[in-house]
Amino acid sequence: MMNSHKTTSAGRIGLLITSLWFSGLALAATPPAANSALDSPATQNTSPPQRTHKKGRSTPNAQSTAATDSGTKAVSPKKRPVKTRSAKTKQRQKAPKLATPTATASLPSSGPHFTSAKASLQLTVNGKAIPYQRFFYTLSPKQQLRFALGNNNDPYELSINGQILKEEHRTWQWQAPDKPGQYQLQLMEKLTHKTLTLALFVLTPLKGKAQAINGFQIGRYPPAKDGKKEYEAPKGFIEVTAKNAGYYVSPHFQLAQFTCKQKCTFPAYVALQPDLIEKLELLLEEVNKRGLRLDKFEVMSGFRTPYYNKSIRNVTHSRHIYGGAADIFIDVSPKDGVMDDLNGDRKYDKQDAALLYDIADKISTRHPDLAGGIGQYSSTGAHGPFVHVDVRGTQARWGK
Ligand SMILES: [Ca+2]
Ligand SMILES: [Ca+2]
């Protein structure tokens, strides 16, 4: 089934040398992520979308709704024509590049540096370590959780929605309410006032044979592929409202970046796996270590409902329908909705996606617990170059 995969070497990461990264890096008003119809299944895929890409947009709205999969026959993005910016766009882009000898040398001498915000308090939830100072966990109504601390004797306080839980030998028990929604856990070290914030999303299940929740179309999940657990339908969905859409589920990623872009009103529902967000955080940290100063990735496509996935004729078992995949690119300068010129050759093509691909590959090697697929995509008439990242549990590579 993985006839088009190939393993890449981890050592081909070029220096990323440009000084363009420092302008306009505010996190403000993260625009809703745009759709990508492209997917990234184990077997690849993709007939190029036909929609004309509008250059120079201010949001990453590289919409494409065309079909993406051709079954088992792979269509290598390498065979597509490489697309570069128009002369007009290039002219706007004429800021000088710094041929810095090291990647980190291009970091600004002033201004905020990247902060990974890894957890300083060692909390586990049902055995799962919480990796960042703010993170999230998903659970079913009435599910029992056990919170536990690392081995130390400092005094702590753990509360959920402001209510302090009783501690017993460095552990706390909590049963999720029947009512789906977002519940806020806060762990505080009393002496230092260090805190860890964990959003507990009690999931809204899709009941019986229903294919929608509160009018939001979900569709029908296919039977689990080969009976594998990672291809089972999600137990439920995070309810996204106008109030929590901008919520940061981790230090750098917001709920709204991953919601499906089918036409809908709030509440919307999203499947989102914590492992995916952890992997994206690690990737973002590594990209910053390489000298690109940015605080987020543009997410072209995060979660897709089976309903939407079917409408774009994508592969049935796309990792996107399980909330475990994201199609991402870097768009800082110029902020125009498409991948930036990462390698400084004044072209915007698959070589720029290749840099991000290589870094993602390295992260995957370092963190086998977050194993998954990485796919490289060239630009088409509908979107710029991008990289697919997922956490399917096994390694898969394509497009490069
Ligand atoms: Ca750009
Ligand atoms: Ca380039």
Image (tube, rainbow, N blue to C red):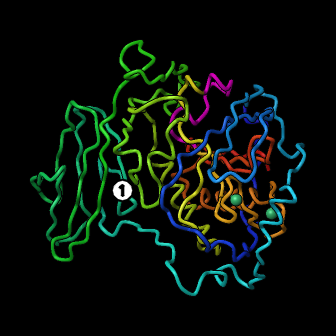
Counting from the top left corner in percent of width and height, residue 275 is at: 47, 49
Circle 1 residues within 10 Å: few <14, some 14–19, many ≥20: some
Counting from the top left corner in percent of width and height, residue 188 is at: 20, 65
Span of residues in magenta:
309-325
Instruction: Find residue 343 and report its image quarter.
Output: bottom right
Counting from the top left corner in percent of width and height, residue 156 is at: 16, 66
Instruction: Find residue 122 and report its image quarter.
Output: bottom left
The local secondary structure at tag 1 comes to strand
Which residue is depicted at the point 60% across and 53% down? 298
In the image: residue 344, left or right of residue 215:
right
Quadrant, the N terminus: top right
Q: Which residue, given by chain and number where applicable, does mark 1 sit on?
A: 129
Q: Which amino acid type is marked by label 1? A: Ala
In the image: residue 10, left or right of residue 148:
right
* 323 falls in the magenta region: yes
Q: Is 326 drawn above or below residue 94 in the view shown?
A: above
